[in-house]
Image (cartoon, rainbow, N blue to C red):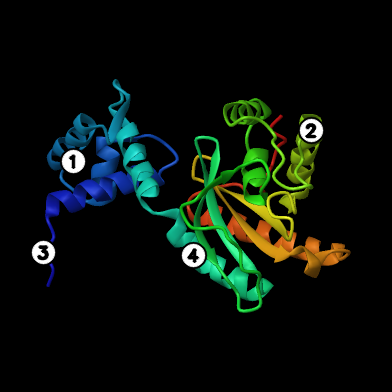
Amino acid sequence: MEKTNRSVARALEMLELVADSTEELTITEISKSLGIPKSTTFDIIYTLVDKGYLDVANARAKSFKLGLKLFQTGAAYLDQAPFYEVARPILEQLAAQARETTFLAMENEGYLVYLDKVESSASVRTSARIGSNNPIYCTGLGKALLAAMPDQRVRDILAMTGGLKPITDYTITDEDKFFTILNEARRRGYAIDDREHNAEVFCVAAPVYNAYGKPQAAISIASLFSKIQNDPARIEQLGGMISRAALLISQRIGFRSDKLYSDFRQ
């Protein structure tokens, strides 16, 4: 039989009770609800207040609410749960379903860093290496992330990394056109890389958000352009797949919205 510390168990029960209540609770209410002596309840409650896990909501009524420390502890859990561990099985499923290569990447100091990839037996083999840095503006992954940022942040990143330099003959180098394409990605729900980083590769990508609603990463499906050209239905199909997968990963790490690009961050 496992040993349980009664005081710790009671403290946790009190936190759960306050968390589940729509109103602030008094010591008397907590004591009665949990069947704990009032003197014991008093000692535990004020220990939790002292540690920041509860706050005094009304000093006269001696009522209590959850404290900031509890939020910080919960937020730390989310930060410590590696999102790529959540993403990996979804990337594998996506690669099998699409029969294409899938990627996971994030932005770091204005560049795109690849974190993971899954190759299908029928998919394109790419030169992208895990851990490598790439320009952010000419990849589907990068544009998915940029479209999730305010336009001024995008301009800052472009200025920091040297602007829209041509990588292939298809790279977008005109800033007005580039922002038009970001707006299209926001409306569509996914970004497109039409041979802008590799002249033979076409990608669709979507952002992954953390529990705070901030873009943390992006995922993509990469295909040979020769397999997908003149096939808008296939592009739309892959775009829907990547958007649903990105939203699923986001929600599993705490994102609370049911939409990607729920507002146009201009």
Q: Residue 114: give its label.
A: none
Reading the image, the residue beneath label 4 is: 88
Q: Nearer the viewer, mark 4 or mark 1?
A: 4
x and y percent of residue 82 in the render? 40, 54
User: Going from the N terminus, do you reach mark 4 or mark 1 first?
Assistant: 1
User: Going from the N terminus, do you reach mark 3 or mark 2 first?
Assistant: 3
Reading the image, the residue beneath label 3 is: 3
Residue that protrudes farthest toward the bottom in the picture: 121
Quarter holding the N terminus is bottom left
User: Going from the N terminus, do you reach mark 3 or mark 4 first?
Assistant: 3
User: Going from the N terminus, do you reach mark 1 or mark 3 first?
Assistant: 3
The amino acid sitting under disc 2 is: Asp
The reply to whether the C-beta atoms of the residues labelled 1 and 3 are less than 8 Å apart is: no
Q: Nearer the viewer, mark 2 or mark 1?
A: 2
| Residue at x 57%, y 27% (from the top left corner) | 160
The reply to whether the C-beta atoms of the residues labelled 4 and 2 are less than 8 Å apart is: no
Reading the image, the residue beneath label 1 is: 41
User: Going from the N terminus, do you reach mark 2 or mark 1 first?
Assistant: 1
Q: Is residue 24 left or right of residue 223?
A: left
x and y percent of residue 234 in the render? 81, 67
Q: Nearer the viewer, mark 1 or mark 3?
A: 3
C-alpha distance separating marks 1 and 3: 21 Å
Question: Dot 2, how many residues are within 10 Å of its Cα: few (below 14), some (14-19), or many (20+)?
Answer: few
| Residue at x 31%, y 30% (from the top left corner) | 63
Looking at the rendered structure, the secondary structure element under dot 3 is loop
Reading the image, the residue beneath label 2 is: 174
The amino acid sitting under disc 1 is: Thr
Q: Nearer the viewer, residue 62 or 1?
A: 1
C-alpha distance separating marks 4 and 2: 35 Å
The amino acid sitting under disc 4 is: Arg
